[in-house]
Every structure is written in C-alpha cells, then in structure tokens.
Image: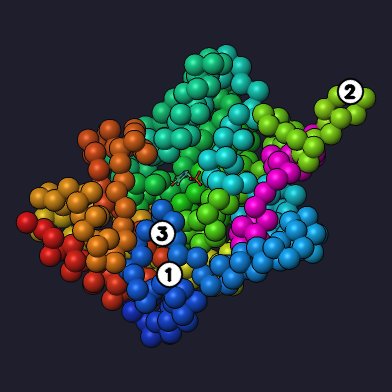
Amino acid sequence: MSAAHGVSVRSRGERSLIHDSGTQATVARLRADTPACENVVHFDNAGSALPPRPVVDRVIRHLRREEQIGGYLAADEVRDELADGYAALARLVGARPEEIAVTDSATRSWVSVFTGVSWREGDRVLTAASEYSSNLIAMFEAARERGVRVERVPSAADGDVDVDALSAMLDDRVRMVAITHAPTNGGLVQPVERIGAALGDHPALFLVDACQSIGQLPLDLDTVNADALSATGRKYLRAPRGTGFLAVRGSALEDLTPVHVDLDSAWLEDGRVRLRGDARRFELFERNVAAVLGLGEAARYYLDVGPEWVHEYVTGLAEHLRERLTELSDVEVTDIGSCRSGIVSFRAHTVPARELVARLKERGVHATVSRASSTPWDMGDRELDELVRASVHYYNTPDEVARFCAEVASMLR
Ligand SMILES: *Cc1c(COP(=O)(O)O)cnc(C)c1O
C-alpha cells in the first residue's frame, strides 16, 4: 500500500515505530518546541493543533514590527520570506510556487475552486459518502442555482470509496470529481491515488479536500493526478488559525474564473478584466501577514520534521490508541476504511460523546465531538449521531494514549 494512502490496517500488530528509543528522543525534542505538552494531553489535532514555538514566535515578531513601522513597511521587509512560504507550501504538495494561493481557510480554498467552474445545467459532480458538509452545501447550492447534478459514488465494503463504481460513472458530463482525502469524523483515508489513476486523462476536474491529510501524510499532486487541492493551516500543519491554502495545477487554471477578484488578482485593460495567470488569481490583496508568515514557518517546520516519519509515527500512534480503546468493553471504535489516518473515532455505549469530551476537558485531556452535521452522508449511512474524535499528532506519546484511555475508562458506567 502506498504511503499516500495511509498505513494499511493489515500492518496492525507489526512492531511499531512509536516505542522505538530513537523515536522517543525525537518526540521529546519536538515536545520541547510545544510547551503546552507539559500541561495538556492534546488529542484535538484534527480540530486545531498546538502550534510549535517557532511558528508562534514568528507571528508575534511580525506583529511587533507592525507596531513599530506599520503594516505596509513591515510587509515590504518580509517580501522574500513570504515568497519562500509559497515555495514551502509548493514543496509540501509537489506543486510549483505559482500553483499556490494562500487563503484564510480550507473552505475558502475549496469553494473558490468549486465556484470558479462555469457550471452548466446537467453537469455532473461525483463525490463520496465521507464528503465534508461545507463542500456538500456548495454542491447543493450549485444544484439549485445551476442545475448541477450532485452524485454520490457508492462505498466499498471496507468503507473506501468504490473506485470501480466511480470509473463506471464517468462520462463526458462529469465536470468534477470532489473527494475528501481524510474525512473529519474518523480514520478513513480515501484512495485518492487510485481515484486519480481511474480518472486518467478524463477532463473532469479532480478536486481533493486535503484539509485533514496535509501535515500528517505525504501528498503529491502528480502522484494523485489531482487538479486542485485545498487545505487549512491550523490542523495537522500546526499553523496559526485563519490560514489556509490552495494548490491548483497550471493546466487547470485557465478553466477557473474566481467569483471574487480585486486589484491584486486582476486588472483592467481596455475596459476588460484580465486575470492573473497563476494561482494567486484566487487571492485578494488584504491578508493577515503575520499569520501568513506563521503558515510558511509551519510548512518549513513540517518539512524539516519529515513527512514520511510524521506519517509513520502518527498512524502508528493512532493505531495503538484504537487497540487500547478496543480493550475497553463499553467502547466501540468507529473508524472505517482500508487505510487509516491519525484520527480516531469512537463511542461509549453508556456515556454520550459530549459528556465524555466535557469531562476529559476538565482533566486537561482534549478531544472533540464529531457531529452528524459535519459529514451528514457518512454518519447517516452508519446511523451515527455523535462520536468522540481523538486525533493524535507526532508530539503525542504512548504514555498520553495510556492516560487518555485510563481517563475514558474511569468515566464509563
Ligand atoms: C476542518 C475541515 C474543513 C474546513 O476547514 P476550514 O479551515 O475550517 O475551512 C474542510 N474539510 C475537512 C475534511 C475538514 O476536516
């Protein structure tokens, strides 16, 4: 199974990297960069991770500079560093810097691409059960306003999207295939490489929501054969809140016309609007420069830590957490799919998810509740209402897994 698909479930029980002494030294060093690790067990990395010290310092330093000389001059001083941030984000996903747009969230990124398509009545969009609700909302709006047909590709028995079924649904009316790589409500990692291979040269735009996968597993636009990918800063990438980015292949750009443009993404020429030729046609002029510097710092930090190692560690630790939770008699781990991410979802039959999460928080243990409203199709299919989501990162440890499970066990009735 290739790396970009997550660690195969079949690797369960194999000797894991997480207990290795060299690994423990690395993790200790990374924890030292993350001072809050001393105080909390942060298993909410799918919600908003703890940013590392260098990221926070970078943001604050820029705000101090703005305090001294004003935002414009402060931005002029960091022009090269800002450009380097685009290069780092590009390296992260195997794109060119001109194929990157910095935004303020994953949703902004995704919606910019989706609404940038000149939808026609009868155009088809194929998506999967695990799709994120905000994306579905945009699709349903397009259905209502433009007569776009939103179609759901069936899932295979293991919970992955059924790639053969997807292939069989392709025809020349399919304008877009939109897939959430790692859904928000559990450990599934969709086989985006196999989907990309199935699409081959089909002209449909392949849009990947990489919001949960970026920063926890290696991603490469070419390998996935994706045209565009959306991501957020605050989750596994550990960047400041209010940051996100978009990667759009140069080949896909000319067919995408952003709904919102300004003097930075477009200009007037002979009374006509001309759009920038690169992905920054999806940006507007104004931004939180300090946060964008933090995003670049976070991308470099992650590349330094090493995406392959991060992936192996995070999936190993998550699998360890699943095994330990499964030992608790009242607990049901609800993750599906042939490959798994760092997101662990479960429910306890005697205690509601929101109560568990609230009581964990009182003890400095952070998890979140995944509600059906975030992934309505998948949760509806499986008749799930609320789940506990515990999402681990490379700065989490097996000791924290033990603590987490002990706390959960103490709350069960
Ligand atoms: C969190 C999440 C989003 C939304 O990210 P924002 O940065 O809040 O817009 C989109 N897709 C998935 C799969 C998510 O988990």
Q: What colour scheme governs how the chains and residues are painted in the rendered image of this protein?
A: rainbow
Q: CA distance from mark 2 to mark 1?
A: 53 Å
Q: Amino acid at mark 1?
A: Tyr
Q: Residues within 10 Å of mark 2 (few under 14, many from 20)?
A: few
Q: Is residue 70 visible?
A: yes
First reached walking from the N terminus: tag 3 or tag 2: 3
Q: Which residue is situated farthest in the front direction here?
A: 68
Q: CA distance from mark 3 to mark 2?
A: 48 Å
Question: What residue is disc 2 on?
Answer: 271
**Contact, mark 3 vs mark 2 (Cβ under 8 Å):** no
- Describe the element under mark 2 as helix, strand or loop: loop
Q: CA distance from mark 1 to mark 3?
A: 10 Å
Task: Indicate which disc residue 394 carries.
Answer: 1
Residue at point 61%, 17% (across, down)? 120
Q: Is residue 217 visible?
A: no
Residue 322, above or below 397: above
Give yes or no for residue 364 being in the magenta stretch. no
Classify mark 2 as within 8 Å of ligand 1 or not, answering yes or no: no
Residue at point 13%, 51% (across, down)? 351
Q: Nearer the viewer, mark 1 or mark 3?
A: 3
Q: Residues within 10 Å of mark 3 (few under 14, many from 20)?
A: many
Where's residue 255, x and y in %?
71, 30
Question: What residue is disc 3 on?
Answer: 45
Q: Amino acid at mark 2?
A: Gly
- Describe the element under mark 1 as helix, strand or loop: loop
In the image, the segment drawn in magenta is 275-296
- The foreground one among 80 and 197 is 80
Q: Which residue is situated farthest in the right direction here?
A: 270
Where's residue 385, x and y in %?
24, 39
